[in-house]
Amino acid sequence: MKPLRHTLSALLLGIVAGGALADAALLNVSYDVARDVYKDFNPLFQKYWQAKTGEKLELRQSHAGSSKQARAVADGLEADVVTMNQTNDIEFLADKGLVAKDWARKFPNNASPYTSAMVFIVRQGNPKNLKDWGDLAGPGVQVILPHPKTTGNGRNTYLSAWAWALRQPGGNEQTAQDFLARLLKNAPLFAAGGRDATTTFMQRGLGDVLVTFESEAEMIAKEFGKGNFTVVYPSLTMQTEFPVAIVEKVVDKKGTRRQATAYLDYLWSKEGQENAARNYLRPRDAELLKKYAEHFPPVKTFTVDEVFGGADKAFAAHFKDGGSFDRIYSGK
């Protein structure tokens, strides 16, 4: 039990608001690059909730790779809510009986309050002229990405590249697998999560291109300056979703269902949607998407349903043991 206890403790990354004076507390277990999103969102919700109910809330955040977080919740990390970057991780918790089977119908938009796209972050001036997925499999190119088996960022990258390969002239499942094999050979390592991949690329100076969420580009700009990189939009990229859910057993045990439901509902409020837009996540609110249009260049996207028949089918075909990733990587 000691290693598990240490692991769970390490996943708790801080407390927001005065815990000693709080009337209730919520833990949001989330994916790796969502720190700033919820760091900004939490005070907004606390102010709203106290004005509405008179109740002071303590809000805590935990961040790591999405699948790692889901496993931590399954192993006992008492999240009131989970806010992930891939459907499979919430389905995993639903299979464990921790999240409702119909979780995607509990909130609008299949319980995904905003979207994003996968983009390339390259060195300033794009010295290797990397413009599309095919360039990432070229000789002498180093690609930095998180692990496709354990992170939503890595899986979205993998699936985006696969879909691009499928849509090339003569593209089929075999040509797509061959292309991914070449691309993955250009990955010198797999980062533990999206923020770790950013650190590897920006601080350690490894790689020619970082594949990440569109929203991460602004976080990189804030930390490292806009003059240190260029953002490249590929010709086709996955529309990524960020599903959210209540952890049923925890909120029933703690008596926090009302607060947890309101917390997630508020992601769809005008204030919650504007916070998403300010953090370079594409809001569902059409008016706000138009207001922040300069943040979101037009990009050709596909959904996981359109190309792969759904997240479950994509996961089974590519990331379960024996799937395409294992077949490719065993021969790397």
Image (cartoon, rainbow, N blue to C red):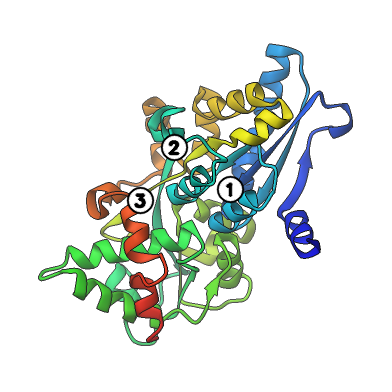
Do labels 3 and 1 touch, CB within 8 Å? no
Q: CA distance from mark 2 to mark 1?
A: 14 Å
Q: Give the residue at x 24% y 71%.
A: 176
* Residue underneath mark 3: 311
Q: Quadrant of residue 158?
A: bottom left
| Nearest the eye: 166 or 299 | 166
Give the foreground label among 2 and 1.
Answer: 2
Q: Nearer the viewer, residue 99 or 272?
A: 99
Give how far across and how far down residue 265 sits, in percent: 54, 25
The disc placed on residue 34 is: 1
Does label 2 or label 3 sit earlier along the sequence? 2
Within-10-Å neighbours for mark 3: few <14, some 14–19, many 20+: some
Identify which amino acid the numbered label 2 is placed on.
Ser
Quadrant in which the C terminus appears? bottom left
- Identify the element where label 2 is drawn: loop
Choose between 171 and 95: the one closer to the eye.
95
Q: Whole-percent x and y of residue 173?
A: 20, 69
Q: Give the amino acid at mark 1.
A: Ala
Tell me the CA gap for discs 3 and 1.
21 Å
Disc 3 versus disc 1: nearer the observer: 3
In this rendering, the answer to whether 146 lies above or below 216 is below
Residue 113 appears in view: no
Q: Secondary structure at mark 1?
A: helix
